[in-house]
Image (cartoon, rainbow, N blue to C red):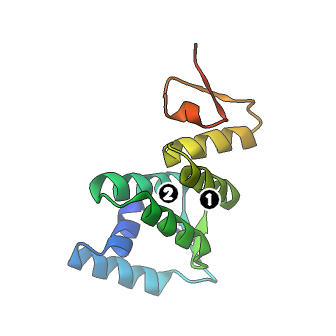
Amino acid sequence: MIGIDTNVLIRYIVRDDVRQTAIATKYLEQHISAVDPGYISQIVLCEIVWVLKRAYGFPKKIIIEVLQQILKTREFSVECPEIARRAIADYEDGNIDFSDCWIGISNRTAGCEFTVTFDRSALLHPAFRECA
């Protein structure tokens, strides 16, 4: 299995740099398959959301569609796919960052009663409590 970094996926998704898009597309099509999928870590998913939102101004709806498509693609193996699905659902339903959704769900899955934070928006998720 080959790990795929955020910048390769961004080129493949956004197609804004002709040279890098061609290289990323060729590489993924030649080296990644349903039999031997490319690995996408939780950090890469979080970075994808950040880059699409901050650097490209993609609306939340499109970002969610991108994440869902990544999860559906047989040529990709996503770290903790069930946590990813739940984080996407929480991100879609609330006004909280995707990475905070992942942290809250991941920590709950690991047995944490809750996660303490100073982040006001993270406190909108039921997995967080204020650090006070």
Give the residue drawn at x 61%, y 69%: 77
* Amino acid type shown at disc 2: Leu
Q: Residue at x 29, y 77 (%)?
A: 21
Q: Residue at x 48, y 82 (%)?
A: 31
**Residue 3 appears anywhere in the view:** no
- Of residue 60 and residue 10, the one placed in the foreground of this image is 60
Under circle 2, the secondary element is: helix
Please give left or right for residue 17 compared with residue 26 in the image.
left
Task: Between residue 95 and residue 43, name the one nearer to us.
Answer: 95
Q: Quadrant of residue 63?
A: bottom left
Q: Are marks 1 and 2 in contact (CB under 8 Å)?
A: yes
Distance from disc 1 to disc 2, alpha carbons, whole Å, reads 9 Å
Look at the image and tell me in which quarter the N terminus lies.
bottom right
* Kind of residue at disc 1: Glu
Q: What label does residue 79 carry, if any?
A: 1
Specify the quadrant that holds the C terminus: top right
**Residue at numbered disc 2:** 45
